[in-house]
Amino acid sequence: MAATIGVIGESRAGETRVALTPDSVKKFVGLGLAIVVETGAGVAAACPDSDYLAAGATIAPSAAAVLSTADVILCVRAPAAEALAGMKPGAVLIGLLNPHGEPDVLQAVAASGVSAFAMEFVPRISRAQSMDALSSQANLAGYRAVIEAAEAYGRALPMMMTAAGTIAAAKVFVMGAGVAGLQAIATARRLGAVVTATDVRPAAKEQVESLGAKFVAVEDEEFKSAETAAGYAKPMSAEYQAKQAALVSEHIKKQDIVLTTALIPGRPAPKLVSAEQATSMKAGSVIVDLAVEQGGNCALAKAGETVITPGGVKIVGIANLPGRVAADASSLYARNLFNFASLMIKDGALVPDFEDEILKAALVAQGGAVVHPALKTG
């Protein structure tokens, strides 16, 4: 009997993305699966019910109708407790479950008895690149952060030479040159800004410079070894942080826009911009903190708010930046999910191999318990 893939509307306030698009419906149908979508689930991401129907999905009148029939539930964020309670015994849940940041939610997921996979834990290996949801969403977050910064800045970013005089190009400083940071650099450059960037990972220097930005960092021996095998930044020593802070402090004073993008998996976001550094910027300057949902890189940032200092510096803390480009974010995320879920499908049936290295790495809950070694307590 063919397995059924289900999607319900996202329950988190402000979540505009959807985990399944009409294009991915076609791909799942091609694998012999049945698809059921709660009515209206994709409206905020420009995916109307009519497009799902045309692609081969069935539209259900309620979340309960989806949950009671689906063998696999795809989600952006973890469903609410009442939704989890309505899932079929032995069902599979796949999504961005924020296992480090929301342990209570993870416990609720585990208690529901489903087999849950967190897309955050998809390993960074070549075979899993097409499933890397963190990268696909960070890419769009970096783009959108520049758009938000430009709006908050209220001035032109490129240099403009006019009969009335010349407008100087905006100076943009990107802190953290991972996926989001590199996209922010590229976007700011396309808009005509003068861009500089910093990162503690040595490999980032070449990437930053390849995009036409200038690299800013204390390049000592600690800097040269500041990257994990998985490509993430390592926490830096207090000594290095002090040297880097002094360099950055002088640099920040001269910037019009600062974008902070640094995240370390399983840890609070590192503080990159102190209150003193933020307030040293001139009136009208802007800081956009992409890490605000994990505590923020800027000491003055507040999730969901724009803080304006007495000196007129705007500190923008928008939560869920990918949700501001919901159609594209959903399209990429749905492809990530399709590629991941396809590992469990054979001849239209759900047959997950829990020893597969990708599935094993992403499995966070099974049999009523949290099973991922990085999340177990006690």
Image (cartoon, grey):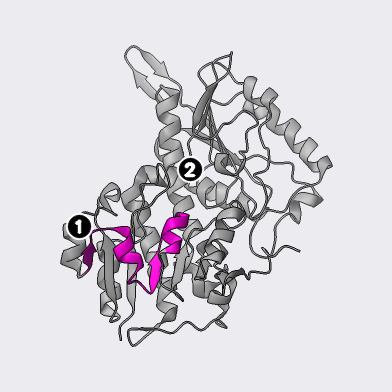
Q: CA distance from mark 2 to mark 1?
A: 33 Å
Examine the image and state in which quarter residue 266 appears: bottom right
Q: Residue at x 30, y 83 (%)?
A: 2
- Asked where in the image residue 330 lies, by quadrant, the reply is bottom left
Q: Quadrant of the N terminus?
A: bottom left
Residue 191 visible at all: yes
The residues colored magenta run 57-85
- Residue 63 lies in magenta, yes or no? yes
- Residue 119 spot, x, y in % from top left: 51, 63
Q: Secondary structure at mark 1?
A: helix
**Nearest the eye: 338 or 257:** 338
Residue occupied by mark 2? 184
Dot label at residue 49: 1
Q: Which residue is depicted at the point 58% across and 48% down?
A: 177
* Percent x, y of residue 51: 18, 60
* Outermost right residue: 239
| Residue 216 falls within the magenta-colored stretch | no
Report x, y in % for residue 16: 35, 47
Q: Amino acid at mark 2?
A: Ala
Say which element carries label 2: helix
Q: Amino acid at mark 1?
A: Asp
**Who comes first in sequence, dot 2 or dot 1?**
1
